[in-house]
Amino acid sequence: MSIHRREKISFTAEKKVSKPVSVEFRTKEGEKVAFKAYTKVSKPVKVEFYAKKKK
């Protein structure tokens, strides 16, 4: 009898996460506008799983 082992796969992927940033600017009238916004940035994430053995 042979033992069928699944193959372990691991790699680094990129996950998009929202990062808070502060935005400031002046309008045409000279009024100052400031607020917090979110931008998407890539974060490295380690992925591991077991693949099924090919027949």
Image (cartoon, helix red, strand yellow):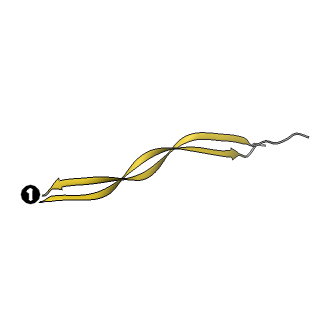
Q: Relative to residue 11, is residue 33 drawn left or right?
A: left
> Which residue is at a point 8% across and 60% down the rendered structure image?
29
Q: Position of residue 52 (x, y in %)?
A: 73, 46
> Which residue is at a point 79% across and 43% down the rendered structure image?
55
Q: Relative to residue 3, is residue 49 drawn left or right?
A: left
> In which quadrant of the rendered image does the N terminus lie?
top right
All told, the count of numbered labels is 1
Q: Which residue is mark 1?
A: 30
Q: Position of residue 17 (x, y in %)?
A: 44, 52
Could you classify mark 1 by the number of other residues whose Cα lies within 10 Å: few (under 14), some (14-19), or many (20 or more)?
A: few
Q: Position of residue 45 (x, y in %)?
A: 53, 45
Question: Tag 1's secondary structure?
Answer: loop
Compared to residue 39, the image places residue 54 above or below, namely above
Compared to residue 40, the image places residue 5 above or below, namely above
Q: Position of residue 23 (x, y in %)?
A: 25, 54
- The part of the image, by quadrant, that contains residue 2 is top right
Residue type (three-letter) at the residue carrying disc 1: Gly
> Which residue is at a point 58% across and 39% down the rendered structure image?
11
Residue sitting at the far left: 29
> Which residue is at a point 55% across and 40% down the rendered structure image?
12
Q: Relative to residue 12, is residue 35 drawn left or right?
A: left
